[in-house]
Amino acid sequence: MTTTPMPEQVRSAVLSMPMAKTLQLSFRRIEPGETEIEMPVLDAFCFRPGQLQATAVFAVADFAAVSAAGTLLPPGWINATIDGTLKLLAPARGKHLLARGRVVDASRLLTVCAAEVFAVDDEGKEQLCATLLGTARNIDAAKH
């Protein structure tokens, strides 16, 4: 029996979610304890032209943080967000957002994770626009 490497399991699990598809998320990097997710700035999620509403910013930050936590899970385990706090620091506008997720502290049942979200302009310049601190619940999928 072969198992899918954890980065591919995380990528597949996240990108199969309807919300991830709606937001048009894509992974730029997946490493143990770290991820980078890109999200285009789409008019459908803006509260004024070119500026994303906070809900979309929270979503990409949450996906990045919790997917980073997922990279450290043992085979057969999944995770889910149980809380998160987003701090908006600057307008979320540009060509796309780049969320860099990371694990702060991992244990068997809970993982504290974080993400920094950058607004990226047409020239590739990044501006920090939000930060998230969250907690993921680690779940043995065989028992649920």
Image (cartoon, rainbow, N blue to C red):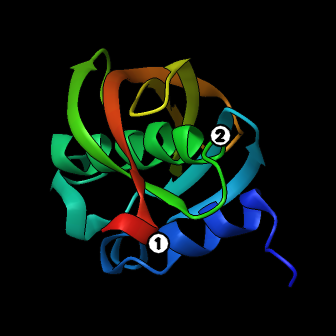
Q: Secondary structure at mark 1?
A: loop
Query: What residue appears at the point 22 percent right and 70 percent down from the top-left corner?
Result: 44
Where does residue 20 sit, x and y in percent of width and height? 40, 70
- Name the residue furthest front: 143
Note whether residue 94 is visible. Answer: no
Q: Label 1 amino acid?
A: Gln
Per the image, the residue denoted by label 2 is 72
Q: Quadrant of the N terminus?
A: bottom right
Where does residue 67 sit, x and y in percent of width and height? 53, 48
Query: What residue appears at the point 46 percent right and 58 percent down from the top-left corner?
Result: 78
Sequence-wise, the earlier of marks 1 and 2 is 1
Where does residue 62 sit, x and y in percent of width and height? 36, 42
Q: 11 left or right of 111?
A: right
Q: How far apart in space, not on screen, are marks 1 and 2 (Cα)? A: 24 Å
Q: 27 left or right of 69?
A: right
Q: Label 2 amino acid?
A: Leu
Q: 54 left or right of 37?
A: left
Per the image, the residue denoted by label 1 is 24
Q: Nearer the viewer, residue 127 or 24?
A: 24
Above or below for 113 versus 12: above
Query: What residue appears at the point 19 percent right and 32 percent down from the top-left corner?
Result: 83
Query: What residue appears at the point 32 percent right and 29 percent down from the top-left corner?
Result: 135
Note whether residue 101 is visible. Answer: yes
Above or below for 79 versus 10: above
